[in-house]
Image: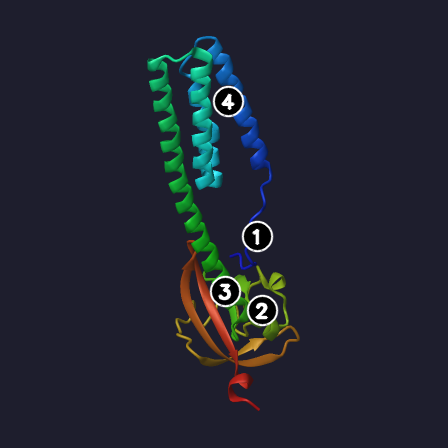
Amino acid sequence: MDTASPPKKPIIPWRHAVLLGLSVMVLFLTVYCLQKGTQTVFTHVYYIPIILASYWYQKKGVLYSAVMGFIYLGFVIFLTGYNPFNVIGAVARVICFIVIAAVVMVLSMRISSQKADLEQSEAKFHGIWNHIQAAVIILDAKTHEIVAANPEAERLTGYPEQEMKGKICHRFICPAENGKCPITDLGMTIDRSERMLLNRNGNSVPVLKTVKAAVIDNREVLIESYIETAAVKGP
């Protein structure tokens, strides 16, 4: 389980270069094919930069598709003369360019919205995880290996999270022997029960312990929370 803060979105400067290169290639191909008398087939290449632009830049991508469409229409009229059949066909293709761009834009906006919601949820989770005034340790329910620990757990145990990960909880942070886990072996329910948490120095820290079973990323886990008894009772 990854509890690190989510990375910032990377800036992708090469998108402009890719789109510019594809645009130049498509326009040169248009001039070449029209001069050779070809009216169709090559126009399918337009969809590559149009789809990319609409996915990357959304509304600006639709504007880009319209600009590319009108440039294509201008080339048709300028290089082949005003032929009504050719012009009508070109106009129909321009409309297709814009419609495809609009569809891709809508899909891209939905994906971006879902990503934003997910990132917001992750930010809330990390805020709670890092600042909650209770130690939280997540264990693999089958192996009892420590999967994650929040900063308060690091403070209570004296171990950094990276050092705790992968360690078996028995005789490490929990005084219970292997095979005698109160939850998985003895079938006990622990809900704000007075227990002891072992720290790095081998000392026992009195805590109120709660354990709940859950499934995270298709993995059965135990979510253990600890509140230091001294903090509850006060001086």
Disc with the residue nearer the chain's start (4 vs 3): 4
Disc with the residue nearer the chain's start (2 vs 3): 3
Q: Which residue is mark 2?
A: 151
In this image, 9 relative to 37: left or right? right
Vertical comparison of 232 with 103: above or below: below
* Residue 43, x across and y down, in percent: 43, 20
Tell whether label 3 touches label 4 (CB within 8 Å): no
Q: Which residue is mark 1?
A: 8
> How many residues crowd mark 2 within 10 Å: few (<14), some (14–19), many (20+)?
many
Residue 108 is at least partly visible in this image: yes
Q: Under tag 4, what secondary structure?
A: helix
Question: Residue at the location (48% across, 35% down)?
Answer: 53
Q: Which residue is mark 3?
A: 138
Alpha carbons under labels 4 and 1: distance apart: 34 Å
The residue closer to the viewer here, 129 or 37, is 37
Question: Residue at the location (57% across, 53% down)?
Answer: 7
